Image (spheres, helix red, strand yellow):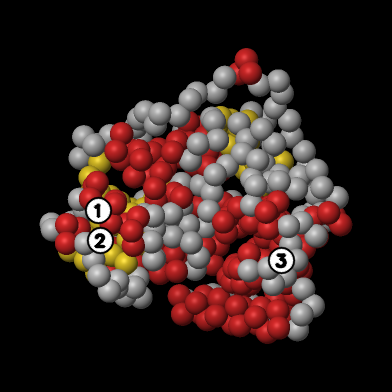
Amino acid sequence: MKKIAILGSTGSIGTQALDVVSQHPDRFQVSAIAANQSAERLYEQVRQFKPAIAALRTEPRDMPEDVKKGTEWFFGEDILTKIPEITDAEDVLVSVVGIVGLSAVMASLNCRKNVLLANKEPLVAGGELVIAAAKANGCNLYPVDSEHSAIFQCLEAAGPNKPVRLLLTASGGPFRTFDKPQIDCATKEQALKHPNWHMGRKITIDSATMINKALEVIEARWLFDMPAQKIDVLVHPQSVIHSMVEFQDGAVLAQLGTPDMRIPILYAMAYPERLTTGSKGVDFFSISALTFEKPDMVRFPGLRLGYDALGVGGTMPAVLNGANEVAVAAFLEDRIKFGGISRLVEEVMNEVPAQFSPGLDDVLEADRVSRAHAKTLLASGRF
Protein backbone atom coordinates (compact mmCIF):
# COMPACT_ATOMS: atom_id res chain seq x y z
CA MET A 1 0.00 0.00 0.00
CA LYS A 2 1.65 3.22 -1.18
CA LYS A 3 0.65 6.47 0.50
CA ILE A 4 0.25 9.48 -1.78
CA ALA A 5 -0.32 13.19 -1.23
CA ILE A 6 -1.96 15.13 -4.06
CA LEU A 7 -1.39 18.87 -4.34
CA GLY A 8 -4.01 20.23 -6.71
CA SER A 9 -6.46 17.37 -6.20
CA THR A 10 -9.46 19.18 -7.72
CA GLY A 11 -7.78 20.03 -11.03
CA SER A 12 -7.66 17.96 -14.20
CA ILE A 13 -4.61 15.87 -13.26
CA GLY A 14 -5.59 15.60 -9.60
CA THR A 15 -9.06 14.26 -10.35
CA GLN A 16 -7.68 11.74 -12.85
CA ALA A 17 -5.10 10.63 -10.29
CA LEU A 18 -7.89 10.01 -7.78
CA ASP A 19 -9.75 8.08 -10.47
CA VAL A 20 -6.90 5.61 -10.84
CA VAL A 21 -6.56 5.41 -7.04
CA SER A 22 -10.22 4.40 -6.88
CA GLN A 23 -9.47 1.61 -9.36
CA HIS A 24 -6.66 0.28 -7.16
CA PRO A 25 -7.74 0.75 -3.53
CA ASP A 26 -5.52 -2.16 -2.49
CA ARG A 27 -2.41 -0.43 -3.88
CA PHE A 28 -2.79 3.26 -3.01
CA GLN A 29 -3.92 5.26 -0.03
CA VAL A 30 -4.54 9.00 -0.27
CA SER A 31 -2.90 10.53 2.80
CA ALA A 32 -3.33 14.20 1.96
CA ILE A 33 -5.10 16.36 -0.59
CA ALA A 34 -4.96 20.11 -1.18
CA ALA A 35 -6.81 22.55 -3.41
CA ASN A 36 -6.77 26.24 -4.13
CA GLN A 37 -10.42 27.21 -3.90
CA SER A 38 -12.70 24.39 -5.12
CA ALA A 39 -14.09 23.69 -1.66
CA GLU A 40 -17.18 21.70 -2.65
CA ARG A 41 -15.23 19.39 -4.92
CA LEU A 42 -12.61 18.91 -2.22
CA TYR A 43 -15.32 17.99 0.29
CA GLU A 44 -16.54 15.26 -2.06
CA GLN A 45 -12.99 13.93 -2.39
CA VAL A 46 -12.60 13.88 1.39
CA ARG A 47 -15.84 11.92 1.73
CA GLN A 48 -14.71 9.35 -0.83
CA PHE A 49 -11.01 8.92 0.03
CA LYS A 50 -10.96 9.90 3.73
CA PRO A 51 -7.44 11.39 3.78
CA ALA A 52 -5.77 12.10 7.10
CA ILE A 53 -5.05 15.65 5.92
CA ALA A 54 -6.92 18.09 3.68
CA ALA A 55 -6.10 21.71 2.89
CA LEU A 56 -7.60 24.76 1.23
CA ARG A 57 -5.85 28.02 0.48
CA THR A 58 -8.79 30.06 1.83
CA GLU A 59 -10.65 28.94 4.93
CA PRO A 60 -14.39 28.69 4.22
CA ARG A 61 -16.90 30.35 6.52
CA ASP A 62 -18.83 27.12 6.98
CA MET A 63 -17.75 23.53 6.51
CA PRO A 64 -19.93 20.43 6.52
CA GLU A 65 -19.51 18.56 9.79
CA ASP A 66 -19.04 15.18 8.13
CA VAL A 67 -15.81 16.20 6.33
CA LYS A 68 -14.18 17.16 9.62
CA LYS A 69 -14.41 13.65 11.06
CA GLY A 70 -11.11 11.81 10.78
CA THR A 71 -9.50 14.50 8.62
CA GLU A 72 -7.25 17.27 9.90
CA TRP A 73 -7.74 20.53 7.99
CA PHE A 74 -5.21 23.24 7.16
CA PHE A 75 -5.71 26.63 5.54
CA GLY A 76 -3.52 29.44 4.26
CA GLU A 77 -1.06 30.58 1.63
CA ASP A 78 1.57 28.06 2.78
CA ILE A 79 -0.41 24.83 2.42
CA LEU A 80 1.61 23.62 -0.58
CA THR A 81 4.84 23.72 1.40
CA LYS A 82 3.25 22.66 4.69
CA ILE A 83 1.58 19.48 3.46
CA PRO A 84 4.86 17.76 2.43
CA GLU A 85 6.23 18.48 5.92
CA ILE A 86 3.35 16.90 7.84
CA THR A 87 2.09 14.07 5.62
CA ASP A 88 3.29 10.49 6.00
CA ALA A 89 2.98 9.98 2.24
CA GLU A 90 6.10 8.75 0.52
CA ASP A 91 5.13 10.26 -2.84
CA VAL A 92 3.77 13.74 -3.55
CA LEU A 93 1.91 14.41 -6.79
CA VAL A 94 2.40 18.10 -7.63
CA SER A 95 -0.38 18.98 -10.05
CA VAL A 96 -0.96 22.63 -9.23
CA VAL A 97 -0.76 25.33 -11.89
CA GLY A 98 1.92 27.99 -11.93
CA ILE A 99 5.13 29.00 -10.22
CA VAL A 100 3.71 28.04 -6.82
CA GLY A 101 4.60 24.50 -7.81
CA LEU A 102 8.32 25.28 -7.50
CA SER A 103 8.17 25.87 -3.74
CA ALA A 104 5.94 22.80 -3.34
CA VAL A 105 8.42 20.60 -5.22
CA MET A 106 11.40 21.95 -3.28
CA ALA A 107 9.59 21.43 0.04
CA SER A 108 8.70 17.85 -0.94
CA LEU A 109 12.24 16.99 -1.98
CA ASN A 110 13.71 18.56 1.13
CA CYS A 111 11.33 16.39 3.17
CA ARG A 112 12.74 13.39 1.28
CA LYS A 113 9.54 12.69 -0.63
CA ASN A 114 9.52 11.37 -4.17
CA VAL A 115 7.82 13.84 -6.51
CA LEU A 116 5.35 12.92 -9.23
CA LEU A 117 5.66 16.00 -11.37
CA ALA A 118 2.69 17.24 -13.38
CA ASN A 119 3.49 20.93 -12.94
CA LYS A 120 5.79 22.35 -15.63
CA GLU A 121 6.95 25.48 -13.85
CA PRO A 122 9.32 23.92 -11.25
CA LEU A 123 11.68 22.56 -13.88
CA VAL A 124 11.11 25.44 -16.28
CA ALA A 125 11.85 28.16 -13.74
CA GLY A 126 14.15 26.33 -11.34
CA GLY A 127 15.36 23.19 -13.10
CA GLU A 128 18.91 23.30 -11.80
CA LEU A 129 17.69 23.80 -8.22
CA VAL A 130 15.14 20.98 -8.43
CA ILE A 131 17.59 18.45 -9.87
CA ALA A 132 20.20 19.36 -7.24
CA ALA A 133 17.64 18.98 -4.42
CA ALA A 134 16.51 15.59 -5.73
CA LYS A 135 20.09 14.32 -5.85
CA ALA A 136 21.01 15.77 -2.46
CA ASN A 137 18.02 14.13 -0.76
CA GLY A 138 18.13 10.83 -2.63
CA CYS A 139 14.64 11.37 -4.08
CA ASN A 140 13.14 10.44 -7.40
CA LEU A 141 11.35 12.69 -9.88
CA TYR A 142 8.73 10.86 -11.89
CA PRO A 143 7.35 12.81 -14.87
CA VAL A 144 3.59 12.85 -15.36
CA ASP A 145 3.43 14.91 -18.57
CA SER A 146 2.65 12.43 -21.35
CA GLU A 147 5.69 13.49 -23.39
CA HIS A 148 8.22 13.26 -20.58
CA SER A 149 6.68 10.05 -19.29
CA ALA A 150 7.11 8.64 -22.79
CA ILE A 151 10.79 9.59 -22.87
CA PHE A 152 11.26 8.19 -19.36
CA GLN A 153 9.69 4.90 -20.42
CA CYS A 154 11.85 4.70 -23.55
CA LEU A 155 14.99 5.34 -21.52
CA GLU A 156 13.98 2.67 -19.02
CA ALA A 157 13.61 0.20 -21.88
CA ALA A 158 16.99 1.22 -23.29
CA GLY A 159 18.92 0.16 -20.21
CA PRO A 160 22.50 1.50 -20.16
CA ASN A 161 22.40 2.77 -23.74
CA LYS A 162 22.82 6.54 -23.91
CA PRO A 163 20.41 8.61 -26.00
CA VAL A 164 21.70 11.04 -28.59
CA ARG A 165 18.43 12.85 -29.29
CA LEU A 166 15.03 13.36 -27.70
CA LEU A 167 11.98 13.77 -29.92
CA LEU A 168 9.03 15.49 -28.25
CA THR A 169 5.77 15.14 -30.11
CA ALA A 170 3.14 17.87 -30.28
CA SER A 171 -0.43 17.65 -31.49
CA GLY A 172 -0.17 21.07 -33.12
CA GLY A 173 -3.16 22.24 -31.13
CA PRO A 174 -6.38 23.67 -32.58
CA PHE A 175 -4.55 26.07 -34.94
CA ARG A 176 -2.19 23.62 -36.64
CA THR A 177 -3.62 24.41 -40.10
CA PHE A 178 -4.38 28.11 -39.52
CA ASP A 179 -2.33 30.81 -41.24
CA LYS A 180 -0.66 33.50 -39.15
CA PRO A 181 -3.41 36.16 -39.51
CA GLN A 182 -6.01 33.60 -38.44
CA ILE A 183 -3.92 32.58 -35.45
CA ASP A 184 -3.32 36.17 -34.38
CA CYS A 185 -7.08 36.85 -34.27
CA ALA A 186 -8.23 33.47 -32.91
CA THR A 187 -10.96 33.55 -30.29
CA LYS A 188 -10.92 32.17 -26.77
CA GLU A 189 -13.55 29.60 -27.70
CA GLN A 190 -11.41 28.35 -30.59
CA ALA A 191 -8.25 28.22 -28.49
CA LEU A 192 -9.91 26.18 -25.74
CA LYS A 193 -11.00 23.42 -28.15
CA HIS A 194 -8.01 21.10 -28.06
CA PRO A 195 -8.37 18.38 -30.71
CA ASN A 196 -7.04 15.47 -28.63
CA TRP A 197 -6.50 16.16 -24.93
CA HIS A 198 -8.74 17.19 -22.04
CA MET A 199 -6.74 19.65 -19.92
CA GLY A 200 -7.15 22.74 -17.77
CA ARG A 201 -7.73 26.15 -19.39
CA LYS A 202 -4.23 27.52 -18.92
CA ILE A 203 -2.38 24.53 -20.39
CA THR A 204 -4.92 24.31 -23.22
CA ILE A 205 -4.06 27.87 -24.22
CA ASP A 206 -0.36 27.04 -23.91
CA SER A 207 -0.94 24.15 -26.29
CA ALA A 208 -2.64 26.47 -28.77
CA THR A 209 0.34 28.88 -28.74
CA MET A 210 2.79 25.93 -28.58
CA ILE A 211 4.43 27.63 -25.62
CA ASN A 212 3.61 24.43 -23.76
CA LYS A 213 6.07 22.65 -26.04
CA ALA A 214 8.65 25.37 -25.34
CA LEU A 215 8.22 24.68 -21.63
CA GLU A 216 8.51 20.94 -22.25
CA VAL A 217 11.81 21.41 -24.09
CA ILE A 218 13.15 23.21 -21.03
CA GLU A 219 11.81 20.49 -18.73
CA ALA A 220 13.40 17.76 -20.85
CA ARG A 221 16.75 19.54 -20.73
CA TRP A 222 16.78 19.15 -16.93
CA LEU A 223 14.94 15.87 -16.46
CA PHE A 224 17.13 13.96 -18.90
CA ASP A 225 20.33 16.04 -18.80
CA MET A 226 20.14 16.72 -22.53
CA PRO A 227 21.31 19.95 -24.23
CA ALA A 228 18.68 21.93 -26.13
CA GLN A 229 20.29 21.31 -29.51
CA LYS A 230 19.58 17.58 -29.05
CA ILE A 231 15.90 18.05 -28.24
CA ASP A 232 13.61 18.26 -31.28
CA VAL A 233 9.88 18.83 -31.55
CA LEU A 234 7.72 16.99 -34.09
CA VAL A 235 4.11 17.90 -34.81
CA HIS A 236 2.18 14.63 -34.70
CA PRO A 237 -1.55 15.37 -35.08
CA GLN A 238 -2.78 11.89 -34.12
CA SER A 239 -1.20 12.05 -30.62
CA VAL A 240 -0.59 8.30 -30.67
CA ILE A 241 3.21 8.48 -30.35
CA HIS A 242 3.79 10.46 -27.18
CA SER A 243 7.54 10.96 -27.68
CA MET A 244 10.65 9.15 -28.86
CA VAL A 245 14.32 8.64 -28.09
CA GLU A 246 17.09 8.15 -30.66
CA PHE A 247 20.31 6.25 -29.94
CA GLN A 248 23.78 6.37 -31.45
CA ASP A 249 23.16 3.42 -33.80
CA GLY A 250 20.25 5.30 -35.38
CA ALA A 251 17.55 3.24 -33.69
CA VAL A 252 14.55 5.10 -32.28
CA LEU A 253 12.33 3.91 -29.44
CA ALA A 254 8.80 5.32 -29.24
CA GLN A 255 6.09 5.10 -26.61
CA LEU A 256 2.56 4.84 -27.98
CA GLY A 257 -0.85 4.98 -26.40
CA THR A 258 -4.30 6.53 -26.54
CA PRO A 259 -4.56 10.19 -25.46
CA ASP A 260 -5.43 9.40 -21.81
CA MET A 261 -3.55 11.14 -19.00
CA ARG A 262 -4.39 8.33 -16.61
CA ILE A 263 -1.70 6.23 -18.30
CA PRO A 264 1.33 8.46 -17.43
CA ILE A 265 -0.24 9.34 -14.05
CA LEU A 266 -0.54 5.70 -13.01
CA TYR A 267 2.87 4.79 -14.42
CA ALA A 268 4.43 7.45 -12.17
CA MET A 269 2.36 6.29 -9.19
CA ALA A 270 3.03 2.57 -9.62
CA TYR A 271 6.55 2.65 -11.12
CA PRO A 272 8.06 0.29 -12.12
CA GLU A 273 4.81 -1.67 -12.36
CA ARG A 274 2.08 -1.22 -14.94
CA LEU A 275 -1.47 -1.45 -13.63
CA THR A 276 -4.81 -1.24 -15.39
CA THR A 277 -6.19 2.25 -16.04
CA GLY A 278 -9.46 1.51 -17.80
CA SER A 279 -8.00 3.16 -20.89
CA LYS A 280 -8.48 1.52 -24.27
CA GLY A 281 -5.41 0.17 -26.02
CA VAL A 282 -4.33 1.46 -29.41
CA ASP A 283 -6.49 0.13 -32.23
CA PHE A 284 -3.92 0.10 -35.01
CA PHE A 285 -6.48 -1.06 -37.57
CA SER A 286 -8.46 2.14 -37.09
CA ILE A 287 -5.42 4.38 -37.63
CA SER A 288 -5.10 5.30 -41.28
CA ALA A 289 -1.72 7.03 -40.84
CA LEU A 290 0.79 8.38 -38.36
CA THR A 291 2.07 11.68 -39.72
CA PHE A 292 4.75 14.14 -38.69
CA GLU A 293 5.36 17.78 -39.53
CA LYS A 294 8.11 20.23 -38.80
CA PRO A 295 6.85 22.90 -36.38
CA ASP A 296 6.45 26.35 -37.90
CA MET A 297 8.14 28.81 -35.57
CA VAL A 298 6.91 31.76 -37.62
CA ARG A 299 3.26 30.91 -37.06
CA PHE A 300 4.04 29.63 -33.54
CA PRO A 301 6.85 31.84 -32.19
CA GLY A 302 6.12 30.64 -28.66
CA LEU A 303 8.04 27.43 -29.39
CA ARG A 304 11.13 29.37 -30.42
CA LEU A 305 11.08 31.28 -27.16
CA GLY A 306 11.80 28.10 -25.20
CA TYR A 307 15.01 27.51 -27.13
CA ASP A 308 15.88 31.21 -26.78
CA ALA A 309 15.42 31.03 -23.01
CA LEU A 310 17.66 27.96 -22.72
CA GLY A 311 20.24 29.69 -24.88
CA VAL A 312 20.41 32.61 -22.47
CA GLY A 313 20.22 30.42 -19.37
CA GLY A 314 20.08 31.56 -15.76
CA THR A 315 16.68 32.93 -14.82
CA MET A 316 15.52 33.57 -18.39
CA PRO A 317 13.26 30.48 -18.43
CA ALA A 318 11.63 31.85 -15.26
CA VAL A 319 11.13 35.18 -17.05
CA LEU A 320 9.50 33.40 -19.99
CA ASN A 321 7.22 31.44 -17.69
CA GLY A 322 6.15 34.40 -15.56
CA ALA A 323 5.39 36.58 -18.56
CA ASN A 324 3.43 33.77 -20.18
CA GLU A 325 1.22 33.26 -17.13
CA VAL A 326 0.30 36.95 -17.17
CA ALA A 327 -0.29 36.91 -20.92
CA VAL A 328 -2.50 33.80 -20.84
CA ALA A 329 -4.56 35.20 -17.98
CA ALA A 330 -5.03 38.44 -19.95
CA PHE A 331 -6.18 36.50 -23.02
CA LEU A 332 -8.66 34.44 -21.00
CA GLU A 333 -10.00 37.71 -19.59
CA ASP A 334 -10.39 39.11 -23.15
CA ARG A 335 -7.79 41.83 -22.57
CA ILE A 336 -5.39 40.89 -25.38
CA LYS A 337 -5.58 39.11 -28.72
CA PHE A 338 -4.36 35.54 -29.07
CA GLY A 339 -1.36 36.63 -31.12
CA GLY A 340 -0.45 39.08 -28.37
CA ILE A 341 0.46 36.26 -25.98
CA SER A 342 3.75 35.35 -27.68
CA ARG A 343 4.53 38.97 -28.56
CA LEU A 344 4.15 40.04 -24.95
CA VAL A 345 6.29 37.17 -23.67
CA GLU A 346 9.05 37.92 -26.16
CA GLU A 347 9.11 41.62 -25.29
CA VAL A 348 9.40 40.83 -21.58
CA MET A 349 12.26 38.44 -22.31
CA ASN A 350 14.02 41.16 -24.31
CA GLU A 351 13.67 43.72 -21.53
CA VAL A 352 14.17 41.76 -18.29
CA PRO A 353 17.81 40.67 -17.82
CA ALA A 354 18.68 37.17 -16.67
CA GLN A 355 20.47 36.43 -13.41
CA PHE A 356 23.00 33.60 -13.52
CA SER A 357 23.72 30.82 -10.98
CA PRO A 358 20.44 31.69 -9.26
CA GLY A 359 19.18 30.50 -5.90
CA LEU A 360 15.50 29.95 -5.12
CA ASP A 361 15.01 33.59 -4.09
CA ASP A 362 16.58 34.75 -7.37
CA VAL A 363 14.21 32.56 -9.38
CA LEU A 364 11.17 33.80 -7.48
CA GLU A 365 12.34 37.40 -7.89
CA ALA A 366 12.80 36.88 -11.64
CA ASP A 367 9.26 35.56 -11.75
CA ARG A 368 7.96 38.58 -9.82
CA VAL A 369 9.81 41.08 -12.00
CA SER A 370 8.72 39.43 -15.25
CA ARG A 371 5.08 39.46 -14.16
CA ALA A 372 5.25 43.09 -13.09
CA HIS A 373 6.87 44.09 -16.37
CA ALA A 374 4.32 42.10 -18.37
CA LYS A 375 1.50 43.91 -16.57
CA THR A 376 3.14 47.26 -17.30
CA LEU A 377 3.38 46.39 -20.99
CA LEU A 378 -0.22 45.21 -20.99
CA ALA A 379 -1.32 48.57 -19.67
CA SER A 380 0.15 50.21 -22.77
CA GLY A 381 -2.61 48.62 -24.87
CA ARG A 382 -0.20 47.49 -27.60
CA PHE A 383 -1.07 43.81 -27.39
Residue 239 rendering spot, x and y as whole percentages: 62, 35
Residue hosting label 2: 54
Question: Rounded to the nearest whole Å, what is the CA distance between mark 3 and mark 1?
Answer: 38 Å
Residue 152 rendering spot, x and y as whole percentages: 49, 41
The answer to the question of whether label 2 and label 3 lie on touching residues, with beta carbons closer than 8 A, is no
Residue closest to the eye, 9 or 213: 9
Residue 144 horizontal side relative to residue 163, left or right: left
Q: Earlier in the sequence, mark 3 or mark 1?
A: 1
Residue hosting label 1: 46
Question: What residue is shown at x 23% (from left), y 50% (from top)?
Answer: 47
- The amino acid sitting under disc 3 is Ile
Residue 327 rendering spot, x and y as whole percentages: 66, 69
Question: Rounded to the nearest whole Å, what is the CA distance between mark 1 and mark 2?
Answer: 7 Å
How would you rate the neighbour count of disc 3 (Cα within 10 Å): few for under 14, some for 14-19, many for 20 or more?
Answer: many
Residue 53 rendering spot, x and y as whole percentages: 21, 60
The answer to the question of whether label 1 and label 2 lie on touching residues, with beta carbons closer than 8 A, is yes
- The amino acid sitting under disc 1 is Val
How would you rate the neighbour count of disc 1 (Cα within 10 Å): few for under 14, some for 14-19, many for 20 or more?
Answer: many
Question: Rounded to the nearest whole Å, what is the CA distance between mark 2 and mark 3?
Answer: 36 Å
Q: Earlier in the sequence, mark 1 or mark 2?
A: 1
Q: Nearer the viewer, mark 3 or mark 1?
A: 1
